[in-house]
Image: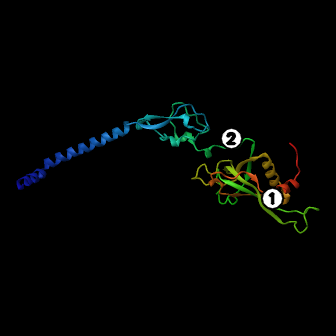
């Protein structure tokens, strides 16, 4: 046993032997590393591709997307590698995705990144309403698309002979006018979505929602009652957290009747 140990020590102390072992180890490391790199470059991975030509501003649905296997070395640029990065997203308004093409990050966007000329989704028979807001009235920019709001009306009561007493004149009226309004968009003064890029701080100037024409006319009447110093106030609710949000409705018949009484009704 001692002779074997001494012989091994002499073998390892031989400079030529150590050099030879080092060269062999280096070659093995290079060989294994090279093979791993080659395999990672040529072993195909599964990526999504367009089964049909997809026009600009179109929602990408599941039936439009297929999968194919491509060597990683061929995936240049910002190729999207997962179906979840594509399905239910939208094509950029200035991009056409050809049939058979892979998807690229620059051509696929979120719905809130669509420009203002893209038609918003809202029920048939409803009318879009654009309410002016500020950072303060949106609670520090805390009203988001898909949130629900209630709309309150603040006004100064004026003396009307036979209707309003002198004691009630010039008193402030405040109450909920419309409830369960779904916000479709929040935009800045240039009409761009406030939340399209969270790395940019944009100031909200308007929130867009849709209401029946009757509600639209009522809100517009309230908005234009400048002699009564009216203000429409959006108030966030937690309806978006509910499985079945409450129905859009007029909250106060009293306020509705007051608005209609102090404005002129015209038949369209």
Tell me the number on the disc at residue 119: 2
What is the CA distance from the residue labelled 1 to the residue labelled 2?
30 Å
Query: Is 55 placed above or below 257 here?
Result: above
Q: Residue placed farthest to the bottom in the image?
A: 167
* Residue 173 relative to residue 31: left or right: right
Q: Nearer the viewer, residue 26 or 119?
A: 119
Locate residue 153, reporting x and y percent. 78, 58
Ranked by sequence position, the earlier of labels 1 and 2 is 2
Which residue is drawn at the image coordinates 55% and 37% (left, top)? 62
Q: Residue placed farthest to the left in the image?
A: 3
* SS at badge 2: loop
Q: Residue placed farthest to the right in the image?
A: 162
Q: Which residue is mark 1?
A: 230
Locate residue 54, reporting x and y percent. 58, 33
Which residue is drawn at the image coordinates 81% and 58% (left, top)? 230
* Residue 218 relative to residue 248: left or right: right
Image-quadrant location for residue 73: top left
- The answer to whether mark 1 and mark 2 are in CB contact below 8 A is no
> Is residue 206 visible from the viewing direction of this image?
no
Which residue is drawn at the image coordinates 82% and 52% (left, top)? 221
* Residue 252 relative to residue 3: left or right: right
Q: Tell me the quadrant of the picture where the C terminus can be found.
A: top right
Q: Nearer the viewer, residue 85 or 33?
A: 85
Locate residue 125, reporting x and y percent. 75, 42
* SS at badge 1: loop
> Is residue 39 visible from the viewing direction of this image?
yes
Image-quadrant location for residue 242: bottom right
């Amino acid at each position: 046993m001692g002779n074997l140990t001494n012989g091994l020590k002499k073998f390892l102390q031989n400079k030529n032997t150590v050099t030879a072992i080092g060269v062999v180890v280096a070659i093995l490391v290079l060989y294994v590393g090279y093979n791993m790199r080659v395999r990672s470059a040529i072993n195909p991975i599964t990526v999504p591709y367009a089964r049909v030509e997809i026009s600009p501003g179109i929602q990408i649905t599941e039936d439009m997307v297929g999968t194919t296997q491509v060597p990683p070395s061929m995936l240049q640029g910002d190729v999207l590698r997962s179906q979840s990065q594509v399905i239910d997203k939208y094509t950029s308004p200035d991009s056409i995705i050809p049939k058979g093409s892979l998807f690229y990050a620059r051509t696929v966007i979120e719905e809130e990144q669509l420009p203002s000329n893209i038609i918003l989704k809202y029920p048939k028979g409803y009318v879009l309403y654009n309410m002016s807001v500020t950072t303060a009235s949106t609670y520090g920019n805390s009203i988001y698309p898909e949130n629900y709001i209630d709309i309150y009306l603040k006004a100064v009561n004026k003396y009307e002979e036979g209707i309003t007493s002198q004691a009630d004149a010039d008193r402030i009226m405040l109450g909920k006018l419309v409830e369960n309004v779904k916000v479709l968009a929040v935009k800045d003064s240039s009409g761009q979505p406030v939340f399209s890029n969270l790395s940019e701080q944009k100031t909200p100037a308007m929130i867009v929602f849709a209401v029946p024409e009757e509600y639209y006319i009522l809100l517009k009447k309230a908005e234009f009652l400048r002699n009564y110093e009216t203000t429409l106030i959006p108030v966030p609710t937690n309806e978006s957290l509910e499985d079945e949000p409450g129905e859009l409705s007029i909250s106060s018949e009293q306020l509705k009747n007051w608005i209609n009484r102090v404005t002129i009704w015209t038949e369209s």
